[in-house]
């Protein structure tokens, strides 16, 4: 758990708190989606200027690394641990939740692909159209996905996944990021 000193921000969660790290990542994803929205409004007026190039490159970098790791953390570690925690029980609802979240990951990847292409064009300083409707579809899909994970998945995992399994998830998260957290 992150500790906050008076007057200072709380430390960012680490793989020692894998559920906290996943939740913190949701906030970063939401901020990247907000940057996409601002960029879609910026491009028609200012084109692929220096600010747009920096923003586009940062969004691409985030969704091609941290967001991918986030989905891997869930699909390769958290979801199986959660399902294992339900072994011998009626886990139909849990399987439906996990299957739905995996389907969301697939849909989000499909929505991201054309955005990535456009953002890479902008980051290279070339003119590109970033349709606000396409950005909004992506951002809204992520917002709904995050809401479901925050309201359903993470509370279930906190209640059902053993401390040993959470520690193993944290180690896998750290390894996935090359030994660090993010």
Image (spheres, rainbow, N blue to C red):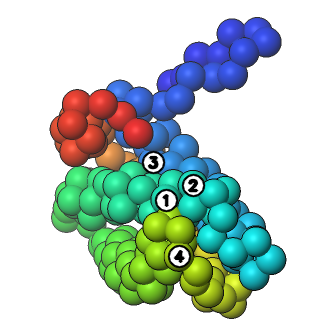
Question: Where does residue 20 sit, x and y in percent of width and height?
Answer: 49, 39
Q: Mark 1 or mark 3: which comes first in sequence?
A: 3
Q: Quadrant of residue 40?
A: bottom right
Q: Is residue 67 above or below residue 135?
A: above
Label 2: element kind: helix
Sequence-wise first label, 4 or 2? 2
Q: Mark 4 points at which residue?
A: 126
Q: State the residue position of label 3.
A: 22
At numbered mark 3, what does the secondary structure look like: helix, strand or loop? Answer: helix
**Nearest to N terminus: mark 4 or mark 3:** 3
Distance, label 1 to label 4, CA atoms, is 13 Å
Instruction: Give me the C-alpha separation between circle 2 and circle 1.
Output: 5 Å
Q: Residue furthest top?
A: 6
Which residue is at 47% across, 75% downward? 121
Tag on residue 54? 2
Cβ–Cβ below 8 Å for labels 4 and 2? no
Label disc, if present, on residue 57 of the rendered structure: 1
């Amino acid at each position: 758990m992150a500790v906050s000193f008076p007057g200072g921000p709380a430390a960012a969660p680490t793989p020692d708190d894998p559920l906290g790290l996943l939740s913190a990542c949701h906030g970063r994803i939401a901020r990247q989606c907000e940057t996409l929205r601002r960029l879609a409004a910026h491009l028609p007026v200012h084109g692929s200027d220096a600010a747009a190039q920096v923003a586009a490159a940062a969004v691409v970098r985030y969704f091609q690394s941290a967001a991918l790791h986030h989905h891997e953390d869930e699909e390769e570690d958290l979801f199986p641990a959660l399902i294992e925690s339900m072994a011998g029980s009626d886990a139909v609802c849990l399987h439906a939740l996990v299957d739905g979240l995996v389907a969301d990951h697939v849909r989000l990847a499909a929505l991201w692909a054309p955005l990535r292409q456009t953002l890479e064009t902008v980051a290279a300083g070339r003119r590109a159209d970033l349709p606000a409707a396409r950005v909004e579809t992506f951002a809204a899909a992520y917002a709904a996905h995050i809401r479901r994970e925050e309201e359903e998945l993470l509370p279930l995992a906190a209640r059902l996944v053993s401390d040993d399994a959470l520690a193993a998830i944290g180690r896998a998260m750290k390894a996935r990021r090359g030994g660090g957290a993010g």
